[in-house]
Amino acid sequence: MVDVKTDVTEALNELRAELRTLSERLARLEAARPPAPPVALAKAPTPALIPQVVPEPIPEEILLVISAAVAAFLGERVPIRQVRLISSPGWALQGRVVIQGSHNLTR
């Protein structure tokens, strides 16, 4: 029967030796590296230079179309409390996947 305690002790000693070796190597690398130049912090833009995004009001026709789509999906009319445009990279990614998938790359 294998002595598990001896195997674990040997593995632990090997890990400690490897850790010592890596620590010494890291200390040598850090000592050989020249000091980093000081980093100048960029000034924050003044509020006057930041473009203000003013959301455009959603036309009533669009709200009616959204309301009709929600009613068709749920099967009953529901009040719409808020409509927000959410920018998501997922839509763009999915569009690219569809377009690239439509290309015939084999000959």
Image: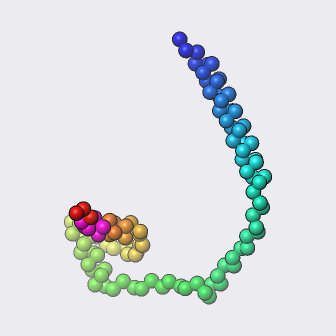
Q: Is residue 29 left or right of residue 88?
A: right
Foreground residue among 47 and 32: 32
Query: Residue 80, how many percent across, how many down?
Result: 33, 73
Depth check: 57 or 19 in front?
19
Where is residue 38, by image quadrant? bottom right
Q: Where residue 53 sits in the image (x, y, percent)? A: 50, 83
Residue 77: tell me if it is visible.
no
> Residue 19: x percent and y percent?
68, 37
Q: Is residue 69 left or right of residue 52?
A: left
Residue occupying the point 68% across, 28% down: 13
**Looking at the image, residue 23 lies above or below residue 51:** above
Looking at the rendering, the stretch of residues picked out in magenta corresponds to 99-104
Q: How is the image coloured?
A: rainbow
Which of the 4 image quarters holds residue 12? top right
- Is 49 left, or right, of 63 in this rendering? right
Q: For residue 102: magenta?
A: yes
Against 36, residue 79 (above or below) is below
In this picture, is 36 found above or below 47? above
Q: Does the segment drawn in magenta span residue 59?
A: no
In which quadrant of the rendered view does residue 87 lie?
bottom left
Q: Residue at x 65, y 23 (%)?
A: 9
Q: Quadrant of the C terminus?
A: bottom left
Q: Of 50 and 16, which appears nearest the observer?
A: 16
Say whether residue 49 is visible. Answer: yes
| Magenta stretch secondary structure, dominant | helix
